[in-house]
Amino acid sequence: MEKITRDNWPESWGRVPAWTEVSEEIYEHFLNVLPPLNYSYPCPYFQCSEPYSHEYQMVRVGNTPKEDRFRWRGKYLTFSKQDGKCWFLGINFSGEYPEKEVS
């Protein structure tokens, strides 16, 4: 996929693959629109504080399946800046992002 800029803003971020390059302007827009939910270093990434969607997820609270619980969790737009480039890392649960596949 080509680099995303203000001129080719996607209709749905849910259709954009993780590790798609974005312009610095897009990166700064999402960083500054609201305070970030997470901002991490040394892998500099941040997540927008407004959930993009929610997903029902199983949570293990004990040692047996009978103790498993399900809950709704928010998923957030995630961005990173590495090696002078800005990246969209997908829509992820809080504190999570996909590792970049090295080929």
Image (spheres, grey):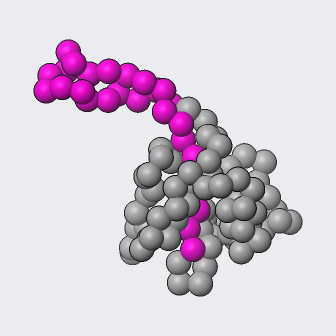
Residue in the picture at 13% in, 27% down: 63
In this view, which residue lies farthest toward the right? Answer: 7
Residue drawn 41% across the image and 29% down it: 57
> Can residue 80 be seen in this snapshot?
yes
Q: Which residue is farthest front?
A: 35
Q: Residue at x 53, y 84 (%)?
A: 83
Reply above or below: 101 against 78.
Answer: below
Image location (x, y in percent) of residue 62: 18, 26
Q: In the rendering, at what x and y percent does residue 50 appear? A: 65, 43
Drawn side of residue 67 relative to residue 79, left or right: left
Return the x and y of residue 99 as percentages of the image width and height: 40, 63
- In the image, is 71 to the left or to the right of 91? left
Determine the residue located farthest toward the top in the rendered image: 66
**Residue at horizontal 77 percent and vertical 71 percent from the top:** 25
Q: Nearer the viewer, residue 27 or 35?
A: 35
Highlighted magenta segment, given as a residue range:
55-81
- The answer to which image quadrant residue 30 occupies is bottom right
Camera-nearest residue between 35 and 61: 35
Q: Is residue 74 left or right of residue 58?
A: right
Assign the magenta stretch its main secondary structure. Answer: strand
Position of residue 91 measured from the top left corner of the image (x, y, whole percent): 56, 48
Quarter location, residue 20: bottom right
Asked if residue 67 lies in the magenta stretch, the reply is yes
In the picture, the quarter occupied by the N terminus is bottom right
Q: Is residue 2 above or below residue 34?
A: below
Could one spot residue 18 in this view of the protein? no
Quadrant assignment for the C terminus: bottom left
Does the magenta segment cover residue 76? yes
User: Relative to 33, does residue 81 appear above or below in the rendering?
Assistant: below
